[in-house]
Image: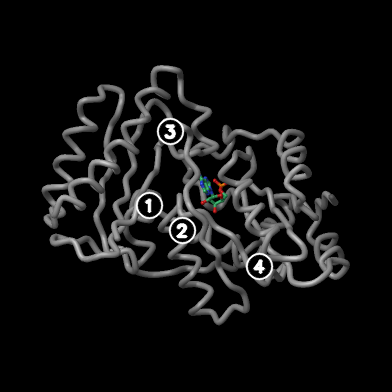
Amino acid sequence: MKVIESITGMKQARWGLSGPVGLVPTMGYLHEGHISLVRRAKKENPSVVVSIFVNPTQFGPKEDFKKYPRDLPRDLALLEQAGTDVVFIPPDAEMYPSDYNTWVDMEKITGRLEGAARPGHFRGVATVCNKLFNIVEPAKAYFGQKDAQQVLVIQKMVKELNMNLEIVVCPIIREPDGLAMSSRNTYLKPDERQAATVLYRSLQLAQKLYDDGERDAGKIRRQMTALIQKEPLAHIEYISIADAANLEEQDKIVTPALVSMVVKIGLPRLLDNIILK
Ligand code: AMP
């Protein structure tokens, strides 16, 4: 496994790789969710590149960029084990030199949910993904359904800017008690970690209500809210039931519908979702 810490180094190494490349963009502090993407990429491509880059431009001024968890030696051991060919760790100053000027700004889809809660977030995400795609030139790039809106944003960018790669979406990997794996789960204290199971329980409740024939999105949202409010450490930021293709909120559920939520427990904003089919 090669570890490359410059853009020119990555471009050179790219031409030494055999066949089409699968790219897995990450911010590091890896867990089984990330590794599931690497395994899928490994299955579908002769060569796999994983990027580790805590992208400063997708963090708001009051967010956790500086504190974001990092553990490079552990990440490298996990990636080696998973059969990664190249780990690309670009320096901030090469990705964004002081006179940096070029951005991918998307409308509509970035104005809702996470885009509304975190102004500028998706501008940073779309821009860094565009840069990584240009540097690595993958045939396929792998993203987790955990960040459902991110997947829609990247798919739309690739389509609308006529980029030559396929976006592969992989299922959410969960802890045994249902909590979606996330690098930020490390911020949770033991009682908060326990409380965090309420997200998945509320999504399962939504699925059950839907399976039992409920189609009124407002009623489902109210029952989810009531369940989460029983957990004193949990603070709901939003619960959305929206068209899975364009994220427009629904009153009557038409499938596929994305039920997504952010609940703050202690420090982190925890994200989770399911798709009702
Ligand atoms: P991050 O390092 O948080 O930027 O995540 C890198 C990639 O891993 C993104 O495409 C995420 O959606 C994906 N990912 C993060 N957590 C999970 C999870 N629990 N299951 C599946 N994919 C995940």
Report the residue that reaches farthest toward the bottom. Answer: 162
Label 1 or label 2, whichever lies nearer to me, is: 2
SS type, badge 4: helix
* Direction from residue 68 to residue 107 in the image, left or right: left
Report the residue that reaches farthest toward the front. Answer: 212
Q: Name the residue under label 2.
A: 150
* Direction from residue 167 to residue 28 in the image, left or right: right
Which of pointers 3 and 1 lies earlier in the amino acid sequence?
A: 1
Q: Separation of disc 3 and disc 4 at Cα? A: 29 Å
Which of pointers 3 and 2 lies earlier in the amino acid sequence?
A: 2
Neighbours of disc 4 within 10 Å: few (<14), some (14-19), many (20+): many
Q: Which residue is drawn at 73% across and 37% down?
A: 72
Which of pointers 1 and 2 lies earlier in the amino acid sequence?
A: 1
Callout 3–callout 1 Cβ contact below 8 Å: no
Q: Name the residue under label 4.
A: 133
> Residue 78 location, x and y as percent?
72, 39
Q: Residue at x 42, y 24 (%)?
A: 193
Residue type at mark 3?
A: Pro
| Label placed on residue 268 | 3
